[in-house]
Image (cartoon, helix red, strand yellow):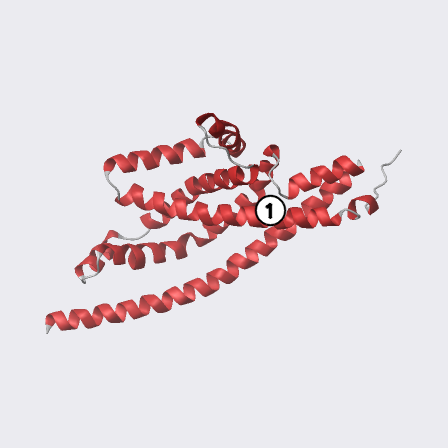
Amino acid sequence: MAYEMHFGAVLARSSEFVDGTINTVLLSGQGIVCGLAIGLAVALLRDHGPRWVKGLARAYVELIRNTPLLVQVFLFFFGLPYIGVQLTADTSAIIAISFNLGAYSAEIFRAGFGAIPKSQIEAGLGLGLTRLQVIRHVVIVPALKVIYPALTGQLTLTLLGSSVVCAISANELTLAASKVESLTFRSLETFLIAGAIYVVLTFVFRLAYWLIGLWLFRRKDAAAFRMTEAVAVRRERVQA
């Protein structure tokens, strides 16, 4: 007998899907912001830090990239209480996602930094820029423009990968769908709707990344032009 799909009972609990979607956006958003900050810091430390710091950063990247996200979620949620740190499921999920994304984004950032010729860095230092200004304007900004497609692709994977945190009952879309399925017994219909929501979220996030890229790089290009003019003026004063 052919299976007949009925979405009525599932759609009657649409408020739970809405709450789950909002929680997924909030959870993923916090993880993405923290993860990018961690990744940028680790990438800079691996390239410009002392030798022992480089070793620690490399160990962190290798450890995270060679273990599954689900295992990392379990370690934060079930492991930290053994050392007296009690975290909620949502907090554990955000921390795990942040550290996971931090390791992957660090390697993406480093790939971008490696694409910047050393001659440009030396030229920036030679023109009187401080090391911090060189890192900011000569290294990070051009590198970010190069790696932006790969970086946003990783952010999309982070959004979708956040579904695994339902294993510790963190409030997000997959957990909401599981609750709806257990109440309605309509598994196929429930997860078809959840899958459709994830597809919509993915396209919304990709549109947001595209708009951010347009705004960011136009702004950065203008800032770089102003920096170039300032350096030229400084060089003329020195020569005079």
User: Nearest the camera: 181 or 161?
Assistant: 181
Q: Residue furthest right?
A: 1
Rendering coords of residue 81 (x, y %): 49, 28
Could you tell me which residue is drawn at 80 percent across and 38 percent down? 184
Could you tell me which residue is drawn at 57 percent across and 41 percent down? 162
Rendering coords of residue 228 (x, y %): 27, 68
Give the labeled residue for mark 1: 24
- 110 shown above or below 229: above
Rendering coords of residue 177 (x, y %): 70, 41
Q: Secondary structure at mark 1?
A: helix
Quadrant in which residue 167 is drawn: top right
Rendering coords of residue 160 (x, y %): 58, 43
Q: Residue furthest top?
A: 82
**Residue 156 visible to the viewer:** no
Q: Quadrant of the C terminus?
A: bottom left
Could you tell me which residue is drawn at 32 percent across and 34 percent down? 56
User: Nearest the camera: 88 or 10?
Assistant: 88
**Residue 98 visible to the viewer:** yes
In-image side of 96 versus 58 (left or right): right
Could you tell me which residue is drawn at 60 percent across and 51 percent down? 202
Quadrant in which residue 127 is drawn: bottom left
Q: Quadrant of the N terminus?
A: top right
| Crowd band around label 1 with a 10 angstrom C-alpha radius: few (<14), some (14–19), many (20+) | many
- 164 shown above or below 239: above
